[in-house]
């Protein structure tokens, strides 16, 4: 086993124990299961049943329902009975926080219970505590006493359990020893897993969720590594990015976190947490999972194996590269907009990628999400903004006659031609990673030339089915040979729908950026239909969304928004839209919008400011993890959030639209 997965160069599922959830089997060789969570009040039996049916008919294989107290836990029986009466036997999962007695009731009713080790016994008061080894051991024993009854009930009823750690709800005890880290998340789950194993209970699934895909990916990898070292086996894994948000951003963030792990064969069941109706999560789950079905994924490929990994998969560290103009070095990753499918380009077309031209003043206005380069098929007939460069194929570059703005894109065989004319400052060299058209000897020769070329930026792509593994392997080869040229990742999609293409782009570039690989991205598409017009605005938005989600380039406000559930104390979708409307110009500010205290200060671990439901019609506002205002009426809470942003010097006035 290579650190945390079966193979880094081809697709192989990680072997895990088989777990039974009612009639559903997951883990081992079984398909990756998709699930969601209801947003209705659990005490409203019919509303919960109706929503569960919509989720099941959309394709959910498990449905999770919140049970914050004994009453909700007991009402799960009514919900289950009504579903059975209507002919729906999909397993139900009870979601438990803070209340062990509710978990014990639910375990006798539904097929699976989910507990959060951060708040099942331990408390989260954001207090800095110090524990001696003896005191720490005493706390573990207290957990054992409180947790073991649930384990025994699950054994008696054949109930499965998910031990679900969340980054933001680590207990004060775990925080005191491990800090707010992926290692803390792992140990939080391992404590409970050790207790369950000591009782010979193994019908367990684990999860390591975070709103930050970097932390989430590192935690899952570390958990696998620890389980294999300590137990010699791995339990099934439930994958998800918590509080991903809604719309395009929520899908991108989820695809990066979940897809990065699925690419390495990790994950037995997934849930995409969107601030939308739960049945809308299922198509996103299915688009993700279907990437890993079929024989093509598991075929042997030509990608060489890896004896030693050249970076740590358990922490983020960007690959070292030298600087070529504004690419590589300490520069944020660049975005290259693909205009190569446009027959003619006029100044107005650049508005799609963040540049608007004011004819009256003869000036360009540049947005925060403005592409750094465009790729096109011919020199342009107008003057460009000062910050925008142009990539063209070599033959067109020869004709461009503007060395300050135009830069050549060369095939590997062109680059190897002796005395070929090149730009004095910036040249792009394309390599299709481990495809049949690129013999090893040619790549080796290209590498030797690149190593001594301070003007060359490498453009990596792959036509292989397992393209993430192929491009990653080429990065490792570059690092092994100490080649430090900057690298731009080129990713094309021919998927039939925008949603599929979005997931394709997010997984295939995000999985590499998460590991610190890459100095830029270029996205191109066909959407499976040559009649569909190019969509540079959509691709530009996706590109900047991917960089934002991987925390490699911040260009906009980030919203950490929970997906709503029966605990939610206000309309999350409407409130998120209202807050977004008045704050979406605050570049780099992270705002958490949480429906209740469970998904409140804990789950918004990364947020700068928080808007949290604390009672019906009542909101508590946070600065970081500090309560600033309690029980604010929801009618004025958005204005109070703006006042808090102003008091904290995080507010700027929105620019006047031209």
Image: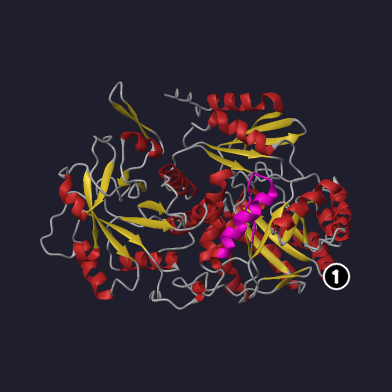
Residue at the extreme bottom: 300
Image quadrant assignment for residue 238: bottom right
Q: How many marks?
A: 1
Q: Residue 114: x, y in percent?
A: 74, 58
Magenta stretch: includes residue 528 = no
Q: Is residue 307 left or right of residue 411?
A: right
Q: Is residue 126 left or right of residue 295?
A: right
Residue for point 68% across, 32% down:
620
In this view, 345 is above or below 434: above
Image quadrant assignment for residue 291: bottom right
Residue at the extreme front: 531
Image quadrant assignment for residue 486: bottom left
Secondary structure category for the residue under label 1: helix
Quarter of the C terminus within the rendering: top left
Residue for point 57% across, 59% down:
287
Q: Is residue 632 left or right of residue 318?
A: right
Query: Principal SS element in the magenta part?
Result: helix
Circle 1 is placed at which residue position?
156
Q: Residue 561: x, y in percent?
A: 62, 42
Q: What are the residue bounds of the magenta stretch?
A: 270-290
Colour scheme employed for the rendering of this structure: secondary structure
Q: Nearer the viewer, residue 650 or 500?
A: 500
Q: Residue 54: x, y in percent?
A: 74, 52
Q: Nearer the viewer, residue 340 or 582?
A: 340
Q: Residue 57: x, y in percent?
A: 73, 57
> Alpha-carbon neighbours of circle 1 within 10 Å: few (<14), some, or many (≥20)?
few
Magenta stretch: includes residue 281 = yes
Q: Can residue 126 be seen from the camera position used here? A: yes
Residue at the extreme left: 419
């Amino acid at each position: 086993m290579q650190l945390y997965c079966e193979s880094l160069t081809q697709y192989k599922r990680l072997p895990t124990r088989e777990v039974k959830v009612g009639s559903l089997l997951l883990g081992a060789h079984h398909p990756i299961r998709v699930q969601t969570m209801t947003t209705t009040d659990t005490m409203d039996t019919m509303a919960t049943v109706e929503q569960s049916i919509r989720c099941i008919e959309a394709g959910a294989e498990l449905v999770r329902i919140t049970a914050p107290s004994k009453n909700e836990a007991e009402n799960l029986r009514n919900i289950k009975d009504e579903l059975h009466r209507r002919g729906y036997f999909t397993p139900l999962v009870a979601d438990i926080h803070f209340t062990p007695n509710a978990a014990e009731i639910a375990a006798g009713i539904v097929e699976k219970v989910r507990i959060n080790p951060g708040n099942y016994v331990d408390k989260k008061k954001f207090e800095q505590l110090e524990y001696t080894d003896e005191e720490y051991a005493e706390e573990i024993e207290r957990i054992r006493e409180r947790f073991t009854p649930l384990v025994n009930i699950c054994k008696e009823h054949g109930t499965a359990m998910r031990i679900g750690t969340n980054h933001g709800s680590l207990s004060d005890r775990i925080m005191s020893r491990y800090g707010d880290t992926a290692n803390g998340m792992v140990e939080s789950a391992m404590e409970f897993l050790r207790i369950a194993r000591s009782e010979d209970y193994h019908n367990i699934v684990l999860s390591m969720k975070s709103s930050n895909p970097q932390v989430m990916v590192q935690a899952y990898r570390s958990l696998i590594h620890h389980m294999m070292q300590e137990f010699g086996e791995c339990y099934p894994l439930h994958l998800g990015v918590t509080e991903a948000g809604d719309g395009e951003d929520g899908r991108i963030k989820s695809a990066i976190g979940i897809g990065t792990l699925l690419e390495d064969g990790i994950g037995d069941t997934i849930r995409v947490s969107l601030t939308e109706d739960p049945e809308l999560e299922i198509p996103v789950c299915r688009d993700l999972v279907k990437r890993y079905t079929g024989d093509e994924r598991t075929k042997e490929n030509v990608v060489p194996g890896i004896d030693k990994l050249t970076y740590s998969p358990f922490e983020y560290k960007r690959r070292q590269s030298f600087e070529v103009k504004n690419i590589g070095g300490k520069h944020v990753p660049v975005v290259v907009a693909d205009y190569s499918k446009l027959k003619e380009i006029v100044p107005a077309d650049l508005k799609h990628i963040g540049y608007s031209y004011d004819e009256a003043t003869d000036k360009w206005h540049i947005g925060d999400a403005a592409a750094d380069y465009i790729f096109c098929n011919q020199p342009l007939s107008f003057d460009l903004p000062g910050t925008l460069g142009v990539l063209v194929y070599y033959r067109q570059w020869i004709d461009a006659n503007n060395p300050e703005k135009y830069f050549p894109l060369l095939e590997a065989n062109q680059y190897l031609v002796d005395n070929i004319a090149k730009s004095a400052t910036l040249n792009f060299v394309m390599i299709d990673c481990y495809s049949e058209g690129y013999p090893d000897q040619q790549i080796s020769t290209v590498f030797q030339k690149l190593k001594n070329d301070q003007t060359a930026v490498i453009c990596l792509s792959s036509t292989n089915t397992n393209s993430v593994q192929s491009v990653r392997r080429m990065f490792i080869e570059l690092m092994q040979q100490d080649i430090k040229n900057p690298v731009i990742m080129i990713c094309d999609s021919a998927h039939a729908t925008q949603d599929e293409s979005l997931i394709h782009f997010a997984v295939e570039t995000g999985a590499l950026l998460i590991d610190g690989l890459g100095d830029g991205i270029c996205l191109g598409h066909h959407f499976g239909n040559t009649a569909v017009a190019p969509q540079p605005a959509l691709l530009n938005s996706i590109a900047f969304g991917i960089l934002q989600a991987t925390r490699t380039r911040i260009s906009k406000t980030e919203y950490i928004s929970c997906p709503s559930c029966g605990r939610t104390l206000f309309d999350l979708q409407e409130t998120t839209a209202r807050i977004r409307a008045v704050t979406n110009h605050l570049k780099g500010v992270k705002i958490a919008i949480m429906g209740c205290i469970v998904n409140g200060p804990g789950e918004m671990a990364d947020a700068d400011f928080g808007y949290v439901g604390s009672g019906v019609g009542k909101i508590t506002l946070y600065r970081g993890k500090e309560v600033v205002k309690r029980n604010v009426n929801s009618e004025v809470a958005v204005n109070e959030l703006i006042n808090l942003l102003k008091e904290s010097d995080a507010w700027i006035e929105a620019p006047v639209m031209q």
